[in-house]
Every structure is written in C-alpha cells, then in structure tokens.
Amino acid sequence: MIQVNNVTLKFGKRTLFEDVNIKFTPGNCYGLIGANGSGKSTFLKILSGEIDTTHGEVIIDKGERLAVLRQNHYEYDEERVIDTVIMGNSRLYAIMKEKEELYSHTEFTDEDGMRLGELEAEFMELNGWEAESEAAELLNNLGVEVDLHYLQMKELPNNKKVKVLLAQALFGNPDILLLDEPTNNLDIEAINWLEEFLINFNNTVIVVSHDRHFLNKVCTHIADIDYSKIKLYIGNYDFWYESSQLALKQMKEQNKKKEEKIKELQSFIARFSANASKSKQATSRKKMLDKIVLDEIVPSSRKYPFIDFKPERETGKEVLTVKNISKTIDGKKVLNNVSFIMQKGDKIAFVGTNNIAKTALFRILMGEDMPDSGTVEWGKTVKCSYMPQDNAEYFNKDQDITEWMGNYYHVDDVTVLRGFLGRMLFSGEEVFKKVGVLSGGEKARCMLSKIMLEAGNVIILDEPTNHLDLESITSLNNGLMKFNGELLFSSHDHQFVQTTANRIIELTDDGLIDRMTDYDTYLEEKMKRENK
C-alpha cells in the first residue's frame, strides 16, 4: 500500500498540489488523469521519491518494492538487454553482481564463503534462479525477439528500447508499479498483452495514459487531478467521465430550480414591499430569499480545443489510386508492392507493427519521398492536408504563434486570428511564444490548426494523438468523426481508430490486408486467422 498524507508541492509562487490525501491499495489499478500541466508525471515522481514535497509525506508499507517505468532510453546503452530487465529489481541485480565478483576470486577466503552463503540464501528468496527466464518471457511477450536479448541496449531501435524498459518495470512482481505513458510507441499486440498483464496483476498499479481504451480496460479507479487536489472515483475512465458530467448536470439543474425560486421571491418582494397589507408577507419572503444559497459549481480546469474540419469543396468520384508501391529504407524493404484505391467516404486506418512503413507510405503519398517503383494518382478535385509524425521542420522559423499561423490564415484581421487561436487554447500572451520553444502538445495543436485553415478535403495524419492530452484527443476524435471528407491515418490509440475508421489496411512484409470494417471487428478476424 502507498499512502499520501497532506502533500503540498510548490514551485516558487505556484502551488501544484495542496494538502493531497489519498491511499492506493493492493489489487487496484489507478488511472491518474488531469489537464496538461496539472502535474501527473510530477505526482508519480513524488510517489517514487524522485521529487521531495514542500509539505506532507508519502508512506510505503515496510518491505514493499516500488518499480517505475523509466523514460530515458539511453540510460542503459552499455548494458545487455536481459540485464537491463533484471535491473528492475535492484537488490536482486546487486546480489548477482556481487556473487559474480566473489566467484571470480582466484583465492577464496572464509569470509568470501560466508558472504556467498548469505547472498545465495537471499538470491533464492528473491527467486533469482528464475530471473533470466522471467526476463526473457517478459521480453518475448512484448515483442523483443530472443536474438536481441544478449545485445547491448544501444544496438536496439528506440521502439524496442521502450519495450525493454517496460519489461524492466514489470520484472519481479513489484508491490507498487508506477507507469507513465506505458503504451507510447507500443504496437497493438504489445498493448493487448500489457492490458491482460495489468488486469491480472494483484498488486498496486498507478498509471498515467492518454489512451482512453487502455484506461477503460485496466483501471479499477480514476484519480483526478484538478485545482491542486486529487479526487478518487471508483470505475474506469468512461465511468468517471459519464458520472462527472452527470453530477455537473444535476448540480446545474438543482441550481436552476433555486434560481427560479429566487426570481419568484424577488418578484413578490418588489411588488408588495411597499404595500402595507402585504409587508409582513414580503418580509417573510425576504428571509426565505436570504436562506437560499446556490451550490457552487466549480468548472473543471480542463479545456477542450475547438477542432472542426470543413473542406472548401467535396472530392469527386476519383480520390486516390496507389499501384504497386515498393520502398526500401536502409537496406530493408518496408513497402512491398502496395496497391489500393481510396473511394469517396473512406476513412482508412493504416495499422501494423512497422511504423516506418506507414510513415514512408504517407511521405510518398504527399510527394515528400519517391517510391522505388509504383505510382500514386490523386483525383483532380483533391486538396490534401498532412500532419507528419515528425513536425520539426515546420517549426524551425523565428516566428511567434500568431506570425506562424498567419502563413496559413489568409484573412487580414488579427482579431479574427486571435479568436481562432483562442479556440485552439492559445490565449493572452501565449500567442507571442516563439514556435521553436513550444511543447509537443502545443506544436500538435498548431499543426491541427494549420489543417483546419487549409480546408482540404483529404487529410493524412501520422500518429496525430502523440503529445496530445485526453481533452485534445477527444476533440480531434470528434472532429474527425464529423469530417465530411476522406481520411488516411495511423494511430496506436485503440478508441481513436475504432470510432474514426470505416476501413482498415494492415501493412505487412508481404503486402497489405484490406478490410471494409471497424477496428474491433478487424482485430477479431485477425485473431481467428492467426489461431487457425
């Protein structure tokens, strides 16, 4: 169990948390949610002891081991993959290294023997003899192949390093597990396995994630950060959202009835306060009026950007024809004879484990790269807008947000532009921030603003939910569901794909699998095919 008592954290004049009291108990998975900047990752660092509190304390039951998902992919570059996982249990790994050092002695003393006896006993208690096989099993389940287990971490691509660090956090059955965005850069198979792992995990889990489907699958509770406090709700993310909206609605309706009663009394007092025969009645009504107190409705600090894609014109019958596209990158063929025709009304989600392939295809479709072979033919009425996964080249200019947005906003009215920026959550002095120093989420909102202003009838999005908070993801999700145009996109956000796409194309080493269906149905069909 981990208990937070009266925790306050201040940075200068800013109070991030104030008198937070909360208890996290075994057998439960807590989804930690809150607006960008509310302190989700900081709170996990407080729990792990990485950040000291200004006031208050965090208490962990004696003897319990806490594990954290590390974010620095380069921290273990000189270590073997298998060792990096075992390091998740620091005490066990220290024992293994000390044993190794003692056994290497050419002259073995009595002290060495006694120490080895102590270490071997503790090693057995910690299930040390099974450590390497457990680490290997975790790696295999997450999609890190056996031939990679004894390489150094620096030899792995980043998407594999992420999986190794996740395996490190899960290793050795920790009593408390802190996970900050564990599904980032994971493929669907790894996410599915992690969901099942956490559902069956009997200890305490506290997780920060922008993946609504993931939170719905694994969470038993939601811990909501708002106004420097943390409030605990039973249930998953959807249950929290619906119940919080319902409570707000009920409070508003209750206040509306009170407001109507106040108006009625005020009207009576105004009419009869000057009438001698009614003055006693008016006085009593005045006393009633004074007793009516409206419940304070504190609106959430969460803000939802206004995302609405409106094409200037519809596409014609011919949208996109892709014939026999192949592409090799760094000696590896990532696209193999890919062909498909995009029809009017299609919203296509591109899925598959090879993220490089999806990005390569989108770049070819946009003319930013050339295929080794094959052709791309766009319809004459198509106006295409694109949001790449790596948007750095768009922000290497010495411009503030207003100037940058002006490149795409062809209305000579700063007031109108400022209004648009406000709806995308850039207000006040923020509009004068230089684009080069924007956060990942701010850059993503800029790119979505650009797409809205371009008013294209076909949109291509490469992992658009990366860097966005839950509120922005929800707004983007809703905007694309309403979008009256054609869409090609990739995303690891299950709910985003399920609610947006009406066609699924999986890119494989041998070509593609193309289905006119929703995502959940596609995954069911895929599981049946693979289990035959």
Image (cartoon, helix red, strand yellow):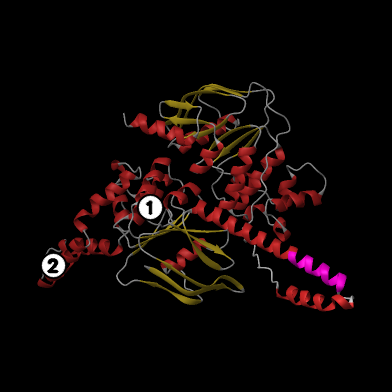
Q: Position of residue 274 (x, y in %)?
A: 90, 76
Judged left or right of residue 340, residue 266 is: right
**Residue 370 occupies quadrant:** top right
Residue 399 seen: no
Q: Which residue is mark 1?
A: 166
Q: Which secondary structure, mark 1? A: helix
Residue flagged by tag 2: what amino acid is it? Gly
402 or 238: which is nearer to us? 238
Comparing marks 1 and 2, which lies closer to the viewer? 1
Q: Residues within 10 Å of mark 1 (few under 14, many from 20)?
A: many
**Residue 269 on the magenta segment:** yes
Which residue sits at x=78%, y=65%?
263
Residue flagged by tag 1: what amino acid is it? Leu
Q: Which residue is mark 2?
A: 117
343 or 1: which is nearer to us? 1
Judged left or right of residue 432, residue 301 is: left
How many angstroms separate mark 1 from mark 2 (CA)?
A: 32 Å
Q: Residue furthest front?
A: 277
State the quadrant of the C terminus: top left
Range of residues picked out in magenta: 261-272
Which residue sits at x=28%, y=57%?
172
Q: Which secondary structure, mark 2? A: helix
Q: Position of residue 78 (x, y in %)?
A: 34, 54
Which residue sits at x=71%, y=65%?
258
